């Protein structure tokens, strides 16, 4: 099976999470006119029982394409946000299913420059797919409870760039 990413937008990504962007968001001028503030543009679900929010930096290596999608993972206790620290695009790959993702549900999205994403709690996704060497600010959860479930596919799925 071969999949190719489509350009992400709020509508096509809604079943899996939220697109982080300042587009069409309210703002106000602050710091004596030297900054514009976009307040509360994302909603993270990190406060599950016995957990706390954490902020990480992931130093991502570029992936080679076509990329073998051999597994998906999900976080049953929290959402997870990825915000690139460089002005570069990246790819995310997601799927649907309760106990395990289905092959037919797998989709890939191209996330453009100046955008990030939030995976909803319990959203199946492939680990970070960077097309260049770059850093990401990642909002996550730390604490008691198993917050990582992985599912490995028998069928070969390739992601084309």
Image (cartoon, grey):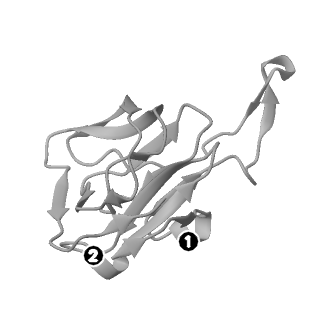
For the point 51% across and 62% down, which residue is it? 109
Instruction: Decide if residue 73 is on the left or right side of residue 125.
Output: left
Q: Which residue is mark 1?
A: 12
Q: Earlier in the sequence, mark 1 or mark 2?
A: 1
Comparing 124 with 88, the one in front is: 88
Q: Quadrant of residue 125?
A: bottom left
Q: Tell me the residue at 24%/40% (across/down).
A: 51
Q: Residue at x 52, y 37 (%)?
A: 84
Q: Position of residue 147 (x, y in %)?
A: 20, 49
In the image, is residue 10 above or below residue 136? Answer: below
Q: What is the quadrant of residue 98 in the picture?
A: bottom left
**Position above or below: 102 against 20:** below
In the rendered image, which residue does mark 2 sit on? 97
As rendered, which of 116 and 91 lies closer to the eye? 91
83 sits left or right of 121 in the view: right
Is 95 or 45 nearer to us in this picture? 95
In-front residue for pair 112/76: 112
- Residue 57's place in the image compared with 20, above or below, is above
Q: CA distance from mark 1 to mark 2?
A: 17 Å
Q: Residue at x 16, y 64 (%)?
A: 152
Specify few, some or many for label 1: CA neighbours under 10 Å numbering under 14, 14-19, or 20 or more. Answer: some
| Disc number placed over residue 96 in the picture, else none | none
Q: How many marks?
A: 2
The image shows residue 12 at horizontal and vertical percentages of 55, 71
Q: Position of residue 85 (x, y in %)?
A: 54, 31
* Label 1 residue SS: helix
The secondary structure type at the circle numbered 2 is loop
Horizontal relation, residue 122 to residue 16: left or right: left
10 Å neighbourhood of mark 2: few (<14), some, or many (≥20)? few
């Amino acid at each position: 099976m071969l999949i190719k990413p489509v350009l992400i937008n709020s509508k096509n990504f809604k079943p899996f999470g939220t697109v982080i962007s300042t587009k069409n968001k309210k703002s106000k001028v602050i710091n004596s006119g030297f900054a514009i503030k976009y307040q509360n543009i994302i909603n993270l679900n990190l406060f599950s029982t016995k957990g706390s929010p954490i902020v990480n930096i992931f130093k991502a290596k570029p992936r080679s394409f076509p990329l073998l999608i051999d597994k998906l993972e999900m976080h049953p206790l929290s959402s997870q946000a990825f915000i690139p620290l460089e002005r570069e695009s990246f790819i995310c790959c997601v799927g649907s299913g309760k106990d395990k993702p289905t092959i037919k549900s797998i989709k890939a999205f191209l996330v453009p420059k100046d955008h990030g994403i939030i995976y909803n709690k319990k959203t199946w996704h492939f680990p970070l797919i960077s097309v260049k060497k770059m850093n990401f600010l990642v909002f996550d959860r730390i604490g008691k409870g198993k917050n990582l479930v992985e599912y490995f596919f028998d069928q070969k799925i390739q992601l084309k760039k």
